[in-house]
Image: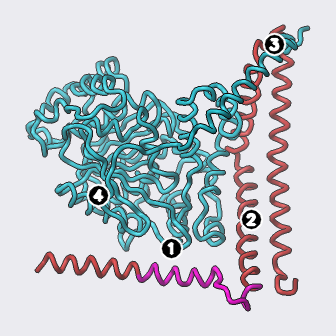
Chain colours: A cyan, B red
Amino acid sequence: MNNPFSSFDAKSTIKHLSEVNSKLMKGAELLTDIEEIDVGTAAKQLIYEEDKLKLYHYKPEAAKACGVPILVVYALVNRPYMLDIQPDRSFIRNLLSLGLDVYIIDWGYPTQADRYLSMDDYINGYIDNCVEAVRKNARSDKVTLMGVCQGGTFSGIYSALHPEKIHSLITLVAPFDFATDDGLLFNWSKNMDIDALVDAYGVVPGSLLNDGFLMLMPFNLNIKKYVDMLEVVEDKDKLLNFLRMEKWIFDSPGQAGECLRQFVKDLYQGNKLAKGKLELGGKTVDLGNIKMPILNIFASADHLVPPEAIKPLNDLVGSKDKTLYEFKGGHIGVFVGSRSQKELAPAIAKWLIDRDSSLPIKAKETPKKVAPAAPIAAKTKTVKPAAAKTAPKKPAAKLATAKPTKAKVKAVAKPKAVKSSVPEVFKTSFKKPAK
Amino acid sequence: MSRCPNLQKPCLLLRQKNIEYQQLMQVTGQEGMQTVVKALASKIEAGEKFEKFDEFFSLWIDINEKAFNKLFQSKVFSDKRNAMTDAGFNARKLYNEIVESQLVDLPIVRRSEMDEVYKIIYDLRKQVKGLESQIQELKTQL
């Protein structure tokens, strides 16, 4: 019988410890050299502000490929700079380099003075005002809403209440059907006393919610991650990458109590949005009112928002042009993963450009770069093959536009060809709307 | 103490719920370690070795992560956790009330008074924003 640790002889153990110490020393030196952990560095301009909210317009990085501006609505939890965490892993820069016109809402950090802000204030107030500001700034009748996580849920609700202002809706890892018990957050939230939480704090501290997120994978997120850091601690660039993510993870704004109360009660506990019973601003939110094109993106290994909470949106909306996109990865990997950089932004750009009738076709075919940005070669390479084969079936009205849609519709009828030629699978739901 | 007679009971309840919660976590941690030991025993029996410390560390992490994930998925954990946090929130709420009652005679603004002000500001802001948009609409109509 052997001791499984017998290979851990004194010599190798001392050598290992010595290496660890050396790494730690070098890491400590590097850490003292790092003056700033820079995040969200893509150039942008403030175009509107209200209370603590700020609306930014990103500086274009390529000739415009899509005439409809995109308004990114991030979740109230954590900060939106995750979408532009560093120059070579920037979802935003990728969209810009493909010729999209991008705006983003920064919700700011609520204080006790904001404790009474409700979902109605965020959706019919702030988002609506931002949509108006974008329409005005871009001189566009409509905008594309791109909502992330909770921001996607808000975007869906907004699109159902104000469909006349929305050209198309893109939701990324956003929950709509809260009936599932698959995700731990969904499980835990079902029976929690949200009144006790909100009444105790007013504005619920972000750190309190963060503790819950860290408990979802306690050993990996609280221990292994920091042990793994030793592998990168000697490399300044890699260490900075690690620190940027750490900064983002622990940069958690507080949550306006009344908004959180309604979000948990009506959605997590009551599932009222999927049931068509959610009331907001005196109106019932009917997702069937969403008739614009929608692109619903979920991550197959999402431990925060399980696919079962995301996918049903395509059956609840009234749109005929609806696309379900599976990203093989986790909740955060959708935005910062290396595969995401190559695949997701180009797929989104392609989807949007296909549905844009405001610019001449010539401009849409080859977005010309003005300034260099992250993985360029990969981006253009992925867009082009996807162009002819992955576009979803379009309504008749769309077919009448001057776009080469016939070939696309034909290609969709041959799913095998699609699978074999593109890295990510576009899945198109042709189910009739539930309503 | 005469001015805060109600805090003792909620604090006891919180302590009780916290102990129940911690016990659940500790039992799961023990079970995880037992599984690690079993995995080690089977390695010994198979004559296998860990070439690096990282291999053992990964085994330890994986087993414990699975054990806790299983616990977190269970209804009993959800119930115990909610009971603990709810007791904590209620105790905090009561504690705030007691602190305020102690400060009532001092010339300082209390949280509840600020909340009243915040509510008034919130309502007024809403009114102003509503009126502004009405004015804007009227302007465009003219």
Residue to which mark 1 is pinned: A116
Residue bearing mark 3: A12
> Which image quarter: residue B101?
bottom right
Q: Is residue B60 above or below residue B11?
A: above
Question: CB under 8 Å between callouts 4 and 3?
Answer: no
Contact (CB < 8 A) between labels 4 and 2? no
Chain letter behind tag 4:
A
Q: For mark 1, does the 10 Å Cα neighbourhood hold few (<14), some (14 to 19), or many (20 or more) residues?
A: many
Subunit ID for the residue under disc 2:
B
Front-most of residues A183 and A402 = A402
The number of callouts visible is 4
User: For this rendering, which residue is in front, A152 or A81?
Assistant: A81
To which residue does mark 4 refer? Answer: A289
Q: Is residue B105 magenta?
A: yes
Q: Which mark is residue B88?
A: 2
Q: Residue at x 43, y 34 (%)?
A: A89
Q: Residue at x 33, y 31 (%)?
A: A426
Instruction: Quote the CA–CA distance across marks 2 and 1.
Output: 22 Å
Residue B76 in the image, given as x and y percentages of width and height: 74, 50
Q: Nearer the viewer, residue A423 or A392?
A: A423
Q: Earlier in the sequence, mark 1 or mark 4?
A: 1
Q: Nearer the viewer, mark 1 or mark 4?
A: 1
Q: Nearer the viewer, mark 4 or mark 3?
A: 3
User: For the residue marked with disc 1, what is the amino acid?
Assistant: Tyr
Q: For the point 57% across and 80% down, which residue is it?
A: B115
Numbered disc in front, either 4 or 2: 2
Assign the N terminus of chain B to one quadrant of the image: bottom right
Q: In the displayed structure, does residue A374 sit left or right of residue B55?
A: left
A395, above or below A187, in the image? above
